[in-house]
Image (tube, rainbow, N blue to C red):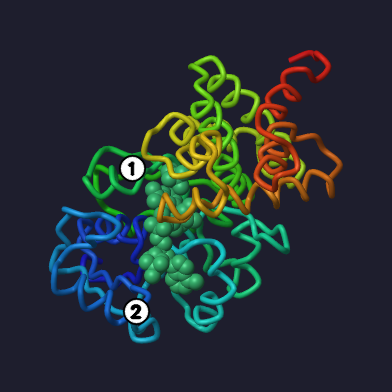
Amino acid sequence: MGERVVTVLGAGSWGTALALVLARSGRTVRLVARSDEQAEYMHAARENSRYLPGIRLPDNLIVTANTVEALQGTVACVYALPCAAADEILPVLREGDYTVIAACKGLHPTTLERTDQVLARYIDLSRIALLSGPSFALEVAQGQPTAITMAASSIARAEAAAALFDDTSFRIYSSDDLIGVAMGGALKNVIAIAAGMADGLGFGHNSVAAAVTRGLAEMARLTSACGGRYETVMGLSGLGDLVLTCTGELSRNRRFGAAIAQGSGVEEAVEGIGQVVEGVRTAAAADRLAVKLDIELPLMQMVHRVLCGSVPLQEAVHGLMSRPERVE
Ligand SMILES: NC(=O)C1=CN([C@@H]2O[C@H](COP(=O)(O)OP(=O)(O)OC[C@H]3O[C@@H](n4cnc5c(N)ncnc54)[C@H](OP(=O)(O)O)[C@@H]3O)[C@@H](O)[C@H]2O)C=CC1
Ligand SMILES: O=C(CO)COP(=O)(O)O
Protein backbone atom coordinates (compact mmCIF):
# COMPACT_ATOMS: atom_id res chain seq x y z
CA MET A 1 0.00 0.00 0.00
CA GLY A 2 2.92 2.38 0.76
CA GLU A 3 3.95 2.57 -2.92
CA ARG A 4 0.54 3.56 -4.25
CA VAL A 5 0.39 6.55 -6.57
CA VAL A 6 -1.97 9.43 -5.79
CA THR A 7 -2.50 12.37 -8.16
CA VAL A 8 -3.27 15.87 -6.90
CA LEU A 9 -4.75 18.39 -9.34
CA GLY A 10 -3.86 21.95 -8.37
CA ALA A 11 -0.48 23.25 -7.24
CA GLY A 12 -1.95 26.17 -5.31
CA SER A 13 -1.91 26.29 -1.52
CA TRP A 14 -4.37 23.50 -0.79
CA GLY A 15 -3.19 21.08 -3.48
CA THR A 16 0.41 21.48 -2.38
CA ALA A 17 -0.47 21.03 1.30
CA LEU A 18 -2.47 17.85 0.58
CA ALA A 19 0.33 16.54 -1.65
CA LEU A 20 2.69 17.00 1.30
CA VAL A 21 0.37 15.04 3.62
CA LEU A 22 0.12 12.23 1.07
CA ALA A 23 3.89 12.20 0.59
CA ARG A 24 4.34 11.97 4.38
CA SER A 25 1.88 9.07 4.25
CA GLY A 26 4.37 7.19 2.05
CA ARG A 27 2.51 7.62 -1.24
CA THR A 28 4.15 8.46 -4.54
CA VAL A 29 2.49 11.80 -5.28
CA ARG A 30 2.07 13.46 -8.66
CA LEU A 31 1.16 17.10 -8.16
CA VAL A 32 -0.25 18.70 -11.30
CA ALA A 33 0.57 22.38 -11.85
CA ARG A 34 -1.13 24.61 -14.41
CA SER A 35 1.89 25.23 -16.66
CA ASP A 36 5.11 23.45 -17.64
CA GLU A 37 7.03 26.47 -16.45
CA GLN A 38 5.53 26.31 -12.93
CA ALA A 39 5.97 22.53 -12.76
CA GLU A 40 9.61 22.68 -13.84
CA TYR A 41 10.36 25.46 -11.39
CA MET A 42 8.73 23.70 -8.43
CA HIS A 43 10.26 20.36 -9.35
CA ALA A 44 13.75 21.83 -9.48
CA ALA A 45 13.46 24.26 -6.53
CA ARG A 46 11.66 21.63 -4.36
CA GLU A 47 9.41 24.41 -3.14
CA ASN A 48 6.13 26.13 -4.04
CA SER A 49 7.50 29.62 -3.54
CA ARG A 50 4.30 31.40 -4.63
CA TYR A 51 1.77 29.59 -2.44
CA LEU A 52 3.72 27.89 0.38
CA PRO A 53 7.17 29.46 0.55
CA GLY A 54 9.80 27.87 2.77
CA ILE A 55 8.29 24.37 2.79
CA ARG A 56 10.42 21.68 1.19
CA LEU A 57 8.83 19.24 -1.24
CA PRO A 58 10.07 15.70 -0.53
CA ASP A 59 11.51 13.45 -3.27
CA ASN A 60 8.41 11.22 -3.46
CA LEU A 61 6.40 14.28 -4.60
CA ILE A 62 6.73 14.79 -8.34
CA VAL A 63 5.49 18.02 -9.95
CA THR A 64 4.21 17.89 -13.52
CA ALA A 65 1.86 19.80 -15.82
CA ASN A 66 0.73 16.71 -17.74
CA THR A 67 -2.65 15.69 -16.28
CA VAL A 68 -3.15 12.64 -18.49
CA GLU A 69 0.26 11.17 -17.65
CA ALA A 70 -0.20 12.03 -13.98
CA LEU A 71 -3.40 9.97 -13.89
CA GLN A 72 -1.83 6.80 -15.33
CA GLY A 73 -2.00 4.00 -12.73
CA THR A 74 -3.21 6.29 -9.96
CA VAL A 75 -5.42 4.94 -7.14
CA ALA A 76 -6.94 8.33 -6.33
CA CYS A 77 -7.12 11.82 -7.73
CA VAL A 78 -7.51 14.78 -5.38
CA TYR A 79 -9.27 17.76 -6.98
CA ALA A 80 -7.70 20.76 -5.20
CA LEU A 81 -8.56 23.52 -7.65
CA PRO A 82 -11.13 26.33 -7.30
CA CYS A 83 -14.75 25.23 -7.85
CA ALA A 84 -14.89 27.48 -10.92
CA ALA A 85 -12.43 25.20 -12.78
CA ALA A 86 -14.51 22.02 -12.25
CA ASP A 87 -16.40 21.96 -15.56
CA GLU A 88 -13.11 22.44 -17.41
CA ILE A 89 -11.15 19.76 -15.53
CA LEU A 90 -13.60 17.04 -14.44
CA PRO A 91 -14.36 15.64 -17.94
CA VAL A 92 -10.75 14.35 -18.00
CA LEU A 93 -11.52 12.20 -14.93
CA ARG A 94 -14.67 10.60 -16.34
CA GLU A 95 -13.19 7.36 -17.68
CA GLY A 96 -10.89 6.19 -14.88
CA ASP A 97 -11.63 3.74 -12.07
CA TYR A 98 -9.73 5.65 -9.36
CA THR A 99 -11.44 7.52 -6.51
CA VAL A 100 -11.91 11.27 -7.02
CA ILE A 101 -11.56 13.21 -3.78
CA ALA A 102 -12.83 16.79 -4.13
CA ALA A 103 -11.19 19.25 -1.73
CA CYS A 104 -12.76 22.47 -3.04
CA LYS A 105 -15.37 24.50 -1.12
CA GLY A 106 -18.10 26.36 -2.94
CA LEU A 107 -21.40 26.29 -4.85
CA HIS A 108 -21.56 26.34 -8.65
CA PRO A 109 -22.15 29.96 -9.67
CA THR A 110 -24.68 29.25 -12.43
CA THR A 111 -26.31 25.89 -11.67
CA LEU A 112 -26.14 26.41 -7.84
CA GLU A 113 -24.99 22.80 -7.49
CA ARG A 114 -22.94 21.56 -4.54
CA THR A 115 -19.54 20.01 -5.21
CA ASP A 116 -20.91 16.45 -4.92
CA GLN A 117 -23.55 17.28 -7.54
CA VAL A 118 -21.03 18.82 -9.94
CA LEU A 119 -18.81 15.74 -9.57
CA ALA A 120 -21.76 13.40 -10.10
CA ARG A 121 -22.34 14.93 -13.55
CA TYR A 122 -19.01 13.46 -14.66
CA ILE A 123 -18.11 10.65 -12.25
CA ASP A 124 -19.95 7.61 -10.88
CA LEU A 125 -21.09 8.10 -7.27
CA SER A 126 -19.09 5.03 -6.20
CA ARG A 127 -15.85 6.91 -7.09
CA ILE A 128 -16.67 10.22 -5.36
CA ALA A 129 -15.41 11.49 -1.99
CA LEU A 130 -15.26 14.96 -0.41
CA LEU A 131 -12.57 16.19 1.97
CA SER A 132 -13.58 19.22 4.02
CA GLY A 133 -13.06 20.73 7.47
CA PRO A 134 -11.03 23.27 9.42
CA SER A 135 -7.66 23.15 7.69
CA PHE A 136 -5.56 26.13 6.71
CA ALA A 137 -3.13 24.96 4.03
CA LEU A 138 -0.08 26.50 5.70
CA GLU A 139 -0.71 24.76 9.03
CA VAL A 140 -1.37 21.43 7.28
CA ALA A 141 1.82 21.84 5.24
CA GLN A 142 3.75 22.52 8.45
CA GLY A 143 2.42 19.26 9.90
CA GLN A 144 0.37 20.91 12.65
CA PRO A 145 -2.39 18.71 14.15
CA THR A 146 -5.53 18.96 12.02
CA ALA A 147 -8.87 17.12 12.12
CA ILE A 148 -10.99 16.96 8.97
CA THR A 149 -13.89 15.00 7.43
CA MET A 150 -13.96 12.62 4.46
CA ALA A 151 -17.44 12.04 3.05
CA ALA A 152 -18.62 9.49 0.51
CA SER A 153 -21.86 7.68 -0.35
CA SER A 154 -21.07 5.06 2.32
CA ILE A 155 -18.88 5.01 5.42
CA ALA A 156 -16.84 2.16 3.92
CA ARG A 157 -16.02 4.30 0.85
CA ALA A 158 -15.18 7.32 2.98
CA GLU A 159 -12.88 5.17 5.15
CA ALA A 160 -11.15 3.74 2.08
CA ALA A 161 -10.44 7.25 0.77
CA ALA A 162 -9.31 8.41 4.22
CA ALA A 163 -6.89 5.45 4.46
CA LEU A 164 -4.75 7.00 1.72
CA PHE A 165 -3.77 9.70 4.20
CA ASP A 166 -1.67 7.92 6.78
CA ASP A 167 -0.15 10.88 8.63
CA THR A 168 -0.79 11.12 12.37
CA SER A 169 -0.92 14.93 12.25
CA PHE A 170 -3.85 14.71 9.81
CA ARG A 171 -6.78 12.95 11.51
CA ILE A 172 -9.74 12.11 9.31
CA TYR A 173 -13.30 11.38 10.45
CA SER A 174 -15.65 9.61 8.03
CA SER A 175 -19.16 10.63 7.01
CA ASP A 176 -21.79 9.38 4.59
CA ASP A 177 -23.46 12.81 4.39
CA LEU A 178 -22.08 14.21 1.13
CA ILE A 179 -24.70 16.97 1.09
CA GLY A 180 -23.97 18.19 4.63
CA VAL A 181 -20.19 18.16 4.16
CA ALA A 182 -20.37 19.96 0.79
CA MET A 183 -22.74 22.61 2.16
CA GLY A 184 -20.69 23.30 5.30
CA GLY A 185 -17.47 23.87 3.36
CA ALA A 186 -19.17 26.18 0.88
CA LEU A 187 -21.33 28.28 3.20
CA LYS A 188 -18.80 28.96 5.95
CA ASN A 189 -16.87 31.10 3.44
CA VAL A 190 -19.81 33.50 3.09
CA ILE A 191 -20.11 33.92 6.86
CA ALA A 192 -16.33 34.41 7.09
CA ILE A 193 -16.68 37.36 4.71
CA ALA A 194 -19.28 38.81 7.11
CA ALA A 195 -16.93 38.26 10.08
CA GLY A 196 -14.13 39.97 8.15
CA MET A 197 -16.44 42.89 7.37
CA ALA A 198 -17.20 43.25 11.10
CA ASP A 199 -13.48 43.26 11.80
CA GLY A 200 -12.80 45.79 9.03
CA LEU A 201 -15.47 48.07 10.44
CA GLY A 202 -13.61 48.04 13.77
CA PHE A 203 -16.20 45.98 15.65
CA GLY A 204 -15.03 43.66 18.42
CA HIS A 205 -15.59 40.05 19.42
CA ASN A 206 -19.34 40.39 20.05
CA SER A 207 -20.20 40.91 16.41
CA VAL A 208 -17.97 38.05 15.26
CA ALA A 209 -19.66 35.72 17.80
CA ALA A 210 -23.06 36.91 16.52
CA ALA A 211 -22.01 36.24 12.90
CA VAL A 212 -20.72 32.74 13.78
CA THR A 213 -23.86 31.77 15.71
CA ARG A 214 -26.49 33.25 13.43
CA GLY A 215 -24.43 32.15 10.42
CA LEU A 216 -24.45 28.61 11.78
CA ALA A 217 -28.26 28.76 12.05
CA GLU A 218 -28.43 29.81 8.38
CA MET A 219 -26.03 27.03 7.36
CA ALA A 220 -28.21 24.50 9.20
CA ARG A 221 -31.40 25.86 7.59
CA LEU A 222 -30.06 25.73 4.04
CA THR A 223 -28.31 22.39 4.52
CA SER A 224 -31.49 20.79 5.90
CA ALA A 225 -33.53 22.25 3.04
CA CYS A 226 -31.11 20.57 0.62
CA GLY A 227 -31.30 17.18 2.38
CA GLY A 228 -28.13 17.34 4.50
CA ARG A 229 -28.00 16.42 8.19
CA TYR A 230 -28.07 18.84 11.14
CA GLU A 231 -25.37 16.89 13.02
CA THR A 232 -23.01 17.26 10.06
CA VAL A 233 -23.41 21.04 10.23
CA MET A 234 -22.44 20.80 13.93
CA GLY A 235 -19.28 18.84 13.08
CA LEU A 236 -15.82 19.60 11.70
CA SER A 237 -16.97 20.39 8.16
CA GLY A 238 -19.59 22.86 9.42
CA LEU A 239 -19.11 24.51 12.80
CA GLY A 240 -15.42 23.56 12.94
CA ASP A 241 -14.55 25.22 9.65
CA LEU A 242 -16.88 28.14 10.38
CA VAL A 243 -15.06 28.97 13.62
CA LEU A 244 -11.64 28.60 11.99
CA THR A 245 -12.46 30.78 9.01
CA CYS A 246 -14.34 33.47 10.94
CA THR A 247 -11.58 33.90 13.51
CA GLY A 248 -8.33 32.83 11.84
CA GLU A 249 -6.06 35.51 10.42
CA LEU A 250 -5.03 33.14 7.62
CA SER A 251 -8.52 33.06 6.10
CA ARG A 252 -8.65 34.70 2.69
CA ASN A 253 -12.45 35.06 2.87
CA ARG A 254 -12.18 36.84 6.21
CA ARG A 255 -9.38 39.11 4.96
CA PHE A 256 -11.42 39.81 1.84
CA GLY A 257 -14.40 40.92 3.99
CA ALA A 258 -12.12 43.21 6.01
CA ALA A 259 -10.74 44.77 2.81
CA ILE A 260 -14.28 45.44 1.56
CA ALA A 261 -15.17 47.13 4.86
CA GLN A 262 -12.10 49.32 4.50
CA GLY A 263 -13.25 50.57 1.12
CA SER A 264 -11.82 48.17 -1.49
CA GLY A 265 -13.88 47.11 -4.46
CA VAL A 266 -14.55 43.37 -4.95
CA GLU A 267 -12.01 42.84 -7.75
CA GLU A 268 -9.41 44.97 -6.03
CA ALA A 269 -9.81 43.01 -2.77
CA VAL A 270 -9.53 39.61 -4.55
CA GLU A 271 -6.47 40.83 -6.44
CA GLY A 272 -4.91 42.06 -3.22
CA ILE A 273 -5.29 38.61 -1.66
CA GLY A 274 -3.81 36.97 -4.76
CA GLN A 275 -5.48 33.61 -4.14
CA VAL A 276 -8.95 32.15 -4.55
CA VAL A 277 -11.78 33.71 -2.47
CA GLU A 278 -14.59 31.19 -2.93
CA GLY A 279 -17.13 33.04 -0.75
CA VAL A 280 -17.81 35.74 -3.35
CA ARG A 281 -19.44 33.43 -5.89
CA THR A 282 -20.95 31.26 -3.17
CA ALA A 283 -22.69 34.29 -1.64
CA ALA A 284 -24.41 34.92 -4.97
CA ALA A 285 -25.37 31.24 -5.28
CA ALA A 286 -26.67 31.10 -1.67
CA ASP A 287 -28.79 34.18 -2.32
CA ARG A 288 -30.38 32.53 -5.37
CA LEU A 289 -30.87 29.23 -3.51
CA ALA A 290 -32.65 31.06 -0.66
CA VAL A 291 -35.09 32.55 -3.15
CA LYS A 292 -35.53 29.26 -5.00
CA LEU A 293 -36.17 27.27 -1.79
CA ASP A 294 -38.13 30.10 -0.14
CA ILE A 295 -36.01 30.27 3.01
CA GLU A 296 -34.50 33.23 4.83
CA LEU A 297 -30.72 33.63 5.01
CA PRO A 298 -30.46 37.23 6.25
CA LEU A 299 -26.70 37.32 6.82
CA MET A 300 -25.62 35.46 3.69
CA GLN A 301 -28.05 37.37 1.49
CA MET A 302 -26.86 40.66 2.97
CA VAL A 303 -23.23 39.73 2.24
CA HIS A 304 -24.22 39.17 -1.38
CA ARG A 305 -26.12 42.48 -1.56
CA VAL A 306 -23.11 44.37 -0.21
CA LEU A 307 -20.76 42.64 -2.66
CA CYS A 308 -22.94 43.36 -5.66
CA GLY A 309 -23.25 46.98 -4.57
CA SER A 310 -27.00 47.06 -3.97
CA VAL A 311 -26.70 47.87 -0.22
CA PRO A 312 -23.93 49.97 1.41
CA LEU A 313 -22.18 48.09 4.23
CA GLN A 314 -23.22 50.46 7.05
CA GLU A 315 -26.82 50.21 5.89
CA ALA A 316 -26.50 46.41 5.80
CA VAL A 317 -25.39 46.35 9.45
CA HIS A 318 -28.29 48.60 10.40
CA GLY A 319 -30.69 46.47 8.37
CA LEU A 320 -29.58 43.24 10.06
CA MET A 321 -29.68 44.74 13.55
CA SER A 322 -33.15 46.25 13.11
CA ARG A 323 -34.90 43.16 11.75
CA PRO A 324 -38.01 42.22 13.78
CA GLU A 325 -36.99 40.55 17.05
CA ARG A 326 -37.65 36.84 17.17
CA VAL A 327 -37.34 33.71 19.28
CA GLU A 328 -33.93 32.08 19.06
N1 LIG B 1 -5.95 27.11 1.08
C1 LIG B 1 -6.63 26.53 2.05
O1 LIG B 1 -6.29 26.70 3.24
C2 LIG B 1 -7.78 25.65 1.72
C3 LIG B 1 -8.43 25.71 0.50
N2 LIG B 1 -9.50 24.91 0.23
C4 LIG B 1 -10.20 24.97 -1.03
O2 LIG B 1 -9.36 24.44 -2.05
C5 LIG B 1 -9.73 25.00 -3.33
C6 LIG B 1 -8.45 25.48 -4.01
O3 LIG B 1 -8.00 26.58 -3.25
P1 LIG B 1 -6.48 26.97 -2.98
O4 LIG B 1 -5.52 25.92 -3.36
O5 LIG B 1 -6.44 27.46 -1.60
O6 LIG B 1 -6.37 28.21 -3.99
P2 LIG B 1 -5.05 28.97 -4.45
O7 LIG B 1 -5.51 30.31 -4.90
O8 LIG B 1 -4.01 28.86 -3.39
O9 LIG B 1 -4.54 28.13 -5.70
C7 LIG B 1 -5.38 27.92 -6.80
C8 LIG B 1 -4.68 27.00 -7.77
O10 LIG B 1 -5.58 26.68 -8.81
C9 LIG B 1 -5.00 27.01 -10.07
N3 LIG B 1 -6.10 27.37 -10.98
C10 LIG B 1 -6.99 28.36 -10.83
N4 LIG B 1 -7.89 28.34 -11.84
C11 LIG B 1 -7.55 27.29 -12.61
C12 LIG B 1 -8.07 26.74 -13.81
N5 LIG B 1 -9.13 27.27 -14.41
N6 LIG B 1 -7.46 25.66 -14.35
C13 LIG B 1 -6.39 25.11 -13.76
N7 LIG B 1 -5.83 25.60 -12.64
C14 LIG B 1 -6.42 26.67 -12.06
C15 LIG B 1 -4.06 28.15 -9.76
O11 LIG B 1 -3.08 28.23 -10.78
P3 LIG B 1 -2.26 29.60 -11.02
O12 LIG B 1 -1.27 29.69 -9.91
O13 LIG B 1 -1.65 29.40 -12.36
O14 LIG B 1 -3.29 30.71 -10.99
C16 LIG B 1 -3.47 27.64 -8.44
O15 LIG B 1 -2.51 26.66 -8.65
C17 LIG B 1 -10.74 26.11 -3.02
O16 LIG B 1 -12.03 25.65 -3.28
C18 LIG B 1 -10.55 26.36 -1.52
O17 LIG B 1 -11.74 26.82 -0.91
C19 LIG B 1 -9.93 23.99 1.14
C20 LIG B 1 -9.29 23.86 2.35
C21 LIG B 1 -8.19 24.69 2.75
O1 LIG C 1 -11.19 26.52 3.95
C1 LIG C 1 -10.24 26.98 4.55
C2 LIG C 1 -9.79 26.45 5.83
O2 LIG C 1 -10.52 25.32 6.24
C3 LIG C 1 -9.51 28.14 4.00
O3 LIG C 1 -10.29 29.27 4.12
P1 LIG C 1 -10.04 30.54 3.19
O4 LIG C 1 -10.32 30.10 1.78
O5 LIG C 1 -10.95 31.60 3.70
O6 LIG C 1 -8.59 30.91 3.35
Q: Determine which quarter of the picture holds residue 123.
A: bottom right
Q: With 103 as the anchor, is 47 left or right in this view?
A: left
Q: Is residue 177 above or below residue 215?
A: below
Residue 94, image x, y percentages: 55, 80
SS class, disc 2: loop
In whole angstroms, how far apart are the C-alphas of marks 1 and 2?
A: 32 Å
Q: Kindly identify the residue that appears in the image at 71 percent across and 47 percent down.
A: 286
Q: State the quadrant of the C terminus.
A: top right
Residue 208, image x, y percentages: 53, 23
Whether disc 2's CB lies below 8 Å from ligand 1 is answered: yes
Q: State the quadrant of the N terminus.
A: bottom left
Eye-nearest disc, 1 or 2 = 2
Q: Pointer 1: residues within 10 angstroms few (<14), some, or many (20+)?
A: some
Front residue of 120 and 166: 120
Q: With 214 as the anchor, is 251 left or right in this view?
A: left
The answer to whether residue 158 is visible is no
Location of mark 2 (residue):
35
Residue 171 image label: 1
Q: With 324 as the anchor, is 109 left or right in this view?
A: left
Front residue of 16 and 145: 16
SS class, disc 1: strand
Q: With 252 as the anchor, is 315 left or right in this view?
A: right
User: Amino acid under label 2?
Assistant: Ser
Q: Is residue 34 above or below residue 146?
A: below
Q: Determine which quarter of the picture holds residue 52.
A: bottom left
**Label 1 with label 2: CB-CB less than 8 Å:** no
